[in-house]
Image: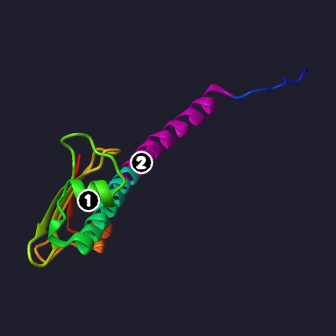
């Protein structure tokens, strides 16, 4: 009797491999998308922190003459903003502290909003503990 020479895989083995690969894809795709979303949010937070540092430099240099449009963006901040999407900043008079910041990141489209009656620090924006982030 001749021996049969078996080469290749059975249909069941191929289906098992396809099912395993499909399960791995279903698990991996949402994780990768979540990482991308989180990195985009982190980019918006970093841009808001950079803008806040510019505001704080403007306040320390110009005091009450520092407003949220020309003197900050023109002198202290190098970013570009679309018309109507410029950051909004409230500076308390007398103490020269930033009490609220609404920053729309032009690259990501996220809006970072943070406010504190006692004054916002750079650490507040970097830690983003009491800020809201929306798109």
Q: Is residue 99 left or right of residue 135?
A: left
Q: Residue at x 60, y 36 (%)?
A: 17
Task: Give the CA separation, mark 1 to mark 2.
Answer: 31 Å
- Residue 106 position, x and y percent, is 31, 45
Q: Is residue 43 left or right of residue 60?
A: right
Q: Which quadrant is the N terminus positioned in?
A: top right
Q: Residue 45 or 11: which is nearer the viewer? A: 45
Q: Residue at x 21, y 63 (%)?
A: 131
As drawn, which residue projects farthest toward the top? 2
- Residue 24 position, x and y percent, is 51, 43
Q: Which quadrant holds residue 15?
A: top right
Q: Is residue 32 magenta?
A: yes
First to last magenta residue range? 10-38
Quick one: SS at disc 1? helix
- Residue 38 position, x and y percent, is 37, 53
Q: Which residue is mark 1?
A: 72
Label 1–label 2 contact, CB within 8 A: no
Local crowd size for mark 1, using a 10 Å CA cut-off: few (<14), some (14–19), many (≥20): many
Q: Which residue is mark 2?
A: 36
Q: Earlier in the sequence, mark 1 or mark 2?
A: 2
Seen in the picture, residue 49 relative to 20 is either above or below; the reply is below
């Amino acid at each position: 009797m001749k021996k049969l020479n078996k080469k290749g895989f059975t249909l069941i083995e191929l289906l098992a491999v396809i099912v395993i690969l499909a399960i791995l894809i279903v698990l991996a795709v949402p994780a990768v998308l979540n990482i991308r979303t989180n990195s985009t949010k982190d980019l918006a937070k970093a841009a808001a922190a950079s803008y806040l540092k510019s505001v704080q430099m403007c306040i320390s240099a110009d005091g009450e003459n520092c407003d949220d449009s020309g003197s900050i963006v023109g002198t202290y901040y190098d970013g570009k903003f679309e018309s109507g999407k410029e950051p909004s900043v409230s500076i308390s008079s007398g103490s020269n502290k930033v009490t609220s910041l609404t920053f729309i990141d032009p690259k990501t489209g996220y809006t970072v909003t943070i406010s504190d009656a006692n004054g916002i620090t750079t650490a507040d924006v970097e830690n983003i503990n009491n800020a809201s982030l929306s798109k």
